[in-house]
Image: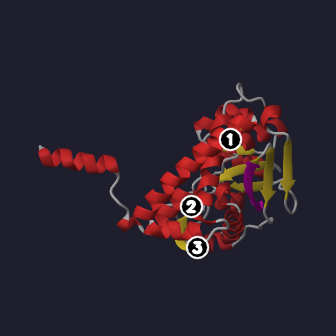
Amino acid sequence: MTGLTLALYRARAALSATERYFRLRRRYPQALKWLRSCRGGAWRTLRAISLARLVQRSHQDPAANPWGAIVQQVSIEGEDRGLAAGRLIALFHSPGDSLLARFAASQNLALVLANKGMAPLLGDLYVRRNRTGLRKLVRHLKTGGRVAIMMDWFAEEGDCAARFLGVPVRVRSGAVRLAACARVPVVPLVTTYARGCLRLRFGPVIPVGAGVEQEGQGRACDPGVC
Amino acid sequence: MRAILEFVEEAIREDPAAWSHLVKFLKKWMTGNDSLPVAEPERARALRYNDA
């Protein structure tokens, strides 16, 4: 990305952040209060989020953006770097998602349960969100493969009560139950992209056991899936 | 589940731009669903029905 393009993106991100700041102040003061507690304050945080979104959109098309032009370095950090066999990688939506998909496809990193939009980027690693897809994932995990699933599905009907960012939430525990079915641990992964560097930060390896049923209000694994 | 959320929460606090859905989450979960303002299309539809 050239310096001029980046400067234009920064200007657009600053405008967008200002607009969002005033909208949040008017309608969602509690959300703004949380953002104010971030390092750098609310406006800077909103600007960083807007900039990350703009950069992501500009990088989504593989034809227009060959890999080498946008990613000069891939940094992988974490306990076992998530690359051991038989792991369920828990993802959260991030501005680096499309780049992560392209990296996963090139390195055969993991099968990914995703929506149709990611299929062209993932190629053979793409798995559809249906019963057949889930069976395929369990088989893959049991034979020592790796699987990546988005975890940030917060919903009123979510079956696991937890606290996130200081707020009581309900989370769908499907991904963790899938890991329990295949008897593999879960590794959380956070992806960021900045200045040509794609940073994959793997969390601790979390064994999944009997606690899943307790957290999932006693729901056992679906025998049709396992 | 909690261990996963704790790790991600720490990462988001370090770099809020790491999670694309942060602002959406803050709006929805910090405000409380009951007090969410009515979305524009719904309000427009309600006005239209009232006129009819």
Q: Where residue A123 sits in the image (x, y, percent)? A: 72, 32
Res A97 → quadrant: top right
Give the Cα distance between marks 2 and 1. Answer: 40 Å
Q: Position of residue A77 (x, y in %)?
A: 85, 57
**For mark 2, what is the residue?**
A172
Q: Earlier in the sequence, mark 2 or mark 1?
A: 1
Q: Counting residues from the N terminus, which is met first, the one under dot 3 or under dot 1?
A: 1
Query: Mark 2, mark 3: which one is toward the viewer?
Result: 3
Dot 2: what SS?
Answer: loop
The chain letter for the residue carrying disc 2 is A
Which residue is denoted by mark 1 in the rendering?
A7
Neighbor class of circle 1 (other Cα within 10 Å; few <14, some 14-19, many 20+) is few
- Give the image location of residue A224, x and y in percent: 59, 52
Residue range in magenta is: A183-193
Q: Which one is in front, B16 or A110?
A: B16
Q: Nearer the viewer, residue B42 or A132?
A: B42
Residue for point 77% across, 62% down: A185
Amino acid type assigned to the residue bearing label 2 in the image: Arg
Quarter of the image for the C terminus of chain A: give it: bottom right
Q: Amino acid at mark 1?
A: Ala
**In the rendered image of this protein, does residue A226 appear above or below residue A56?**
below
The residue drawn where x is 58% and y is 60% is A43
The residue type indicated by label 3 comes to: Arg
Q: For residue A163, which numbered disc appears in the image? A: 3
Disc 3 element: strand
* In this rendering, the label closer to the viewer, 2 or 1: 1
Q: Secondary structure at mark 1?
A: helix
Residue A214 shows up from this direction: yes
Label 2 and label 3: CA atoms lie apart by 13 Å
**Mark identifier at residue B31:** none
